[in-house]
Image (spheres, rainbow, N blue to C red):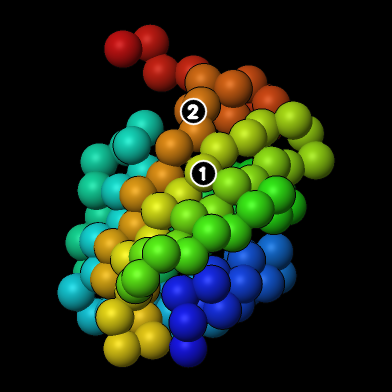
């Protein structure tokens, strides 16, 4: 699969809150670094991250653009509540091996009426 196709599958699984489907898109030793948080290493830990996030908030990813360059795909997204962000996905052998996401965590917490850390 091309990186763009992998990300289209990622968005579909994300919007269904399909944790198994999402996890299966990652390599065993993948790294997911949402820059507002510490990096998550390993497919099983990434799966746990998604389980926790979906338990906290109703999230929807609306694709604005997907770009592809070599083994990288770049996803520009928004959600129905006004949050915007982008993700960079490096793929190898039809799996995501590295992901980095940029989004405003404070806005996310406020929109979803989640506690704001005092630190």
Q: Nearer the viewer, mark 2 or mark 1?
A: 1
Disc 1 residue crowd, few under 14, some 14–19, many 20+, Cα 10 Å: some
Q: Residue at x 46, y 75 (%)?
A: 3
Residue 84: give x, y in percent of width and height: 63, 35
The answer to which of marks 2 and 1 sits earlier in the sequence is: 1
- Between 113 and 13, the one nearer to me in the picture: 13
Tell me where residue 34 appears, x and y as whole percent.
37, 44
Say which quadrant the C terminus sits in. Answer: top left
x 59%, y 22%: residue: 107
Q: Secondary structure at mark 1?
A: strand
The vertical placement of 70 against 112, above or below, is: below
Residue 14, how many percent across, how many down? 61, 65
Q: Is residue 46 left or right of residue 111?
A: left
Percent across and percent down for residue 36 are 36, 32
**What residue is shown with label 1?**
86
| Image mark for residue 72 | none
Q: Nearer the viewer, residue 4 or 36?
A: 4
User: Foreground: 67 or 90?
Assistant: 67
Residue 105 is labelled as 2
Residue at figure coordinates x 62%, y 66% from the top left: 11
Q: Residue at x 25, y 41 (%)?
A: 38
Q: On the image, which quarter does residue 54 sit in?
A: bottom right
Most extreme residue toward the front, as rendered? 69
Would residue 17 be visible to someone looking at this image?
A: no
Q: Give the CA separation, mark 2 to mark 1.
A: 13 Å
Within 10 Å of the Cα at label 2, are there few (<14), some (14-19), or many (20+) other Cα atoms? some
Element on which disc 2 rests: helix
Q: Is residue 57 above or below residue 68?
A: above
């Amino acid at each position: 699969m091309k990186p763009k196709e992998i990300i289209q599958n990622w968005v579909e699984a994300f919007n269904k809150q399909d944790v198994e489907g999402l996890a299966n898109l990652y390599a065993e030793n993948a790294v997911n670094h949402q820059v507002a948080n510490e990096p998550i290493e390993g497919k099983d830990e990434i799966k746990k991250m998604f389980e926790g996030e979906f338990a906290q908030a109703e999230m929807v990813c609306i694709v604005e653009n997907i770009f592809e360059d070599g083994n990288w795909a770049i996803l520009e997204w928004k959600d129905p509540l006004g949050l915007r962000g982008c993700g960079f996905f490096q793929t190898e052998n039809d799996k995501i091996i590295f992901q980095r996401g940029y989004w405003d965590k404070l806005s996310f917490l406020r929109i979803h009426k989640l506690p704001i850390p005092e630190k």
